[in-house]
Image (cartoon, rainbow, N blue to C red):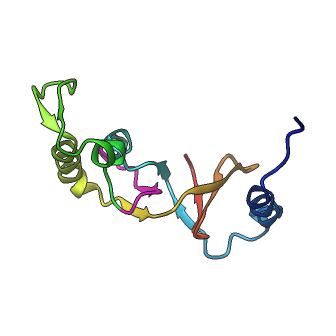
Amino acid sequence: MEPHLNPQVLATALAHDKPPHASFDGAIETDAVIIGAGPVGLFQVFELGLLEIKAHVIDSLAYAGGQCVELYPDKPIYDIPAVPVCTGQELTNSLLKQIVPFGAVFHFGQEVCIVEKLEDGRFFVETSKGTRFLTKT
């Protein structure tokens, strides 16, 4: 059986067949872009915030929490350090409360389509909704 490209995949590839860094007009310049607003992404906001590094967070879901909220919001989780038991929603709520002082900016309902390392060491990131970033990490 010969492999073939799905027409939708091919159309998406052709739509992105342009140099992403052709223009940075309107790109958001930031210290860090975090892909994923699940527990690990939210904790990364906290860790970066302690170092006074501002972050933008991109997630395909319409809200924070990732798989913890999507798959088991009410199921007990037993393997979080120093927390005997919590649900996915409780963990997410605690992490969101913890990062409030750090002012992360969330971009929900978007997937990362392009990541390109630039000559100056920064990264160009573009989402499925056309949101563009120039980021140090």
Q: Residue furthest right?
A: 2
| Quadrant placement of the N terminus | top right
Which of 118 and 64 lies nearest the eye of the viewer?
Answer: 64
Determine whether, in the image, residue 19 is placed left or right of residue 66: right
Q: Residue at x 42, y 63 (%)?
A: 108
Which residue appears at 60% of the width and 64% of the height?
128
Hey, which quadrant is residue 55 in on the image?
bottom left
Q: Residue 12: image x %, image y %?
A: 74, 61
Question: Is residue 51 a member of the stretch shown in magenta?
Answer: yes
Name the residue rendered at 36%, 47% in the picture. 66
Instruction: Residue 45: give x, y in percent of width and height.
Output: 35, 47
In percent of width and height, residue 110 lies at: 51, 62
Residue 43 position within the rendered picture, expressed as x and y whole percent measured from the top left: 31, 41
Which portion, as a residue range, is magenta? 46-62
Q: Nearer the viewer, residue 14 or 100?
A: 14
Q: Is residue 134 magenta?
A: no
Q: Which one is nearer the viewer's eye here, 86 or 30?
A: 86
